[in-house]
Amino acid sequence: MLLKVINPNTTASMTATIERSARAVAGPGTRLEVVSNPMGPASIESHYDEALSVPGLLAEIQAGERAGVAGYVVACFGDPGLDAARELATAPVLGIAQAAMHAASMLGRGFSVVTTLGRTVGRAHDLALSYGFERVCLGVHACEIPVLELETDPDAFATIVESCRAAMLSDGCDAIVLGCAGMADLCARISDAVGVPVVDGVSAAVVMVEALARMGLRGASTGEFARPPGKPYTGLLSGFELPGDPVRF
């Protein structure tokens, strides 16, 4: 079985962190292709970044379809382009926020999210609502570390632990969800430090999509998630035009 894990940003060192987390949980016989976005932002910390990460992400989904990939992971906590990726892919596509929230919801009565910058808190709340976790997502807390500084700030671990403890105190949560793929390699250490389960979305998504593939399940292919109809695309996006019956205007 071949699974494809896509880092929607272009930073190779973060992709390496994601790959270590993914390979640590992949089952016997599972092959992983872990890739960076071929175009787009170095990190995703705004709606603008997220929007411009999607074309490259979809190009990687298209390449995976040609290679016979059995499942995909979108390894950014904003789950950018997830619905569009599901339209293109025949195999299941999971975002790490959705997977992490599902996993955390099974560990206790409620979880809190600890993410990077305060400007991303609203997005995390929106995702919890859209995925049906509004009741069990007890809070979203920012540690105010930019994504790329997770790798370089010597105080990053201590700051994240402090934010987790503050979340536990204020929310009464039973588990913590890490709100950035760049935190994946810190998961076990944070859990040891704070004494509650800490969920890394990369690991959760790899295990879940692997399970769906082993069950022989495919992504939805009717209604909203049917393959998009063919139509002209122009300019920089002309290469994204899909074959198929054209829409008549």
Image (spheres, helix red, strand yellow):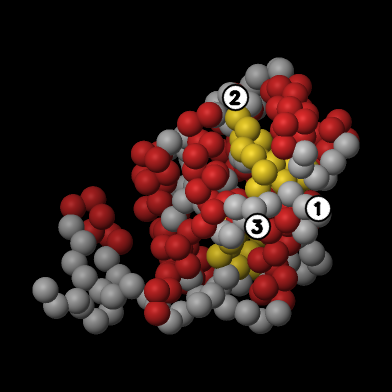
Q: Position of residue 220 (x, y in %)?
A: 50, 77
Q: Position of residue 104 (x, y in %)?
A: 74, 52
Task: Please give the residue where the numbered disc 3 appears in the rendered image.
Answer: 99
Left or right: 174, with 61 as reference point: right
Q: Which quarter of the figure has residue 5?
A: bottom right
C-alpha gap between disc 3 and disc 1: 16 Å
Task: Please give the residue where the numbered disc 1 appears in the rendered image.
Answer: 108
Checking the image for residue 145, the label placed there is 2
**Amino acid type at mark 2:** Ile
Front-most of 87 and 29?
A: 87
Q: Quadrant of the N terminus?
A: bottom right
**Amino acid type at mark 3:** Ala
**Amino acid type at mark 1:** Gly
Q: Position of residue 249 (x, y in %)?
A: 11, 74
Tag 3 or tag 2, which sits nearer the N-term?
3
Q: Is residue 129 above or below residue 177?
A: below
Tag 1 or tag 2, which sits nearer the N-term?
1
